[in-house]
Amino acid sequence: MKRSQKILIELLNHLKISANKLSEEIGLTANTSIYHVKNGRNGISSDLADKIVTRYPEISYNWLLTGEGSMLNSKEDEGVLNEPRQQYEKLNKEDIALSLHQDLKQDLKAIAEGLATNFETINKGLLRTLQGQQKIIKFIENINPEEINKGAKELSKFLQEHK
């Protein structure tokens, strides 16, 4: 019999529950993880040990993984074990929040730079359009209607002569 099998059987005997009930108690949707350990197919993973210890804090995490030491935590051990875990969870949340804040700052900076580039492009396009319109207006203002009439008459005369 494998070490993990012995540990699980000893745990089930201590808790006076079945493998199926343990699966329910630790929030597993299927009992296959527990039965794979019970049948010797798998060992106890750190994730499974964590679920067990979360539900049954009196059980030693180290004992679940190694079989060494006592199955039960002493009251002293419980306080020592829970304090670092709480500190770790707090630090982990702070790290995540800081990371999200930094990612958000970078995203906002990229958006601002993109908007600035877009506005600059639009500005240049509008400026070129206005300059083109001013050239058209100057051209129209410089048109002499008398010269246009004179040119039209000469063109008409030329066309009639060369029919």
Image (tube, grey):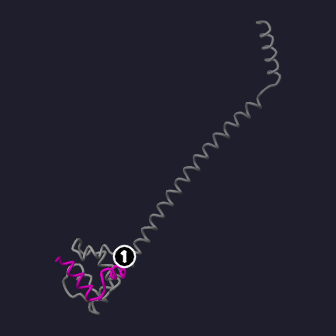
Q: Name the spot of residue 120 as percent of width and height, x first.
A: 58, 48
Q: Nearer the viewer, residue 46 or 37?
A: 37
What type is the residue that disc 1 sits on?
Leu
Q: Quadrant of the C terminus?
A: top right
Residue depicted at 43% across the width and 70% down the height: 98
Residue 27 magenta: yes
Relative vertical location of residue 124 with respect to residue 154 in this rendering, above or below: below
Relative vertical location of residue 77 with respect to residue 144 in this rendering, above or below: below
Q: Name the spot of residue 14 as percent of width and height, x first.
A: 26, 89
Q: Main secondary structure of the magenta part?
A: helix
Q: Is residue 86 left or right of residue 13?
A: right
Say which residue label 1 marks. Answer: 28
Q: Quadrant of the N terminus?
A: bottom left
Residue extending furthest left? 1
Q: Is residue 145 left or right of residue 64?
A: right
Occupied quadrant, residue 2 = bottom left
Occupied quadrant, residue 79 = bottom left
Residue depicted at 73% across the width and 33% down the height: 138
Q: Nearer the viewer, residue 80 or 8?
A: 8
Residue depicted at 48% across the width and 60% down the height: 107
Q: Is residue 8 left or right of residue 110?
A: left
Q: Is residue 112 left or right of residue 48?
A: right
Q: Which residues are magenta?
A: 1-29
Residue depicted at 22% across the width and 71% down the height: 41
Residue extending furthest bottom? 75
Q: Residues within 10 Å of mark 1 (few under 14, many from 20)?
A: some
Q: Name the spot of residue 4 as percent of width and height, x first.
A: 21, 77
Q: Name the spot of residue 42 as percent of width and height, x first.
A: 24, 72
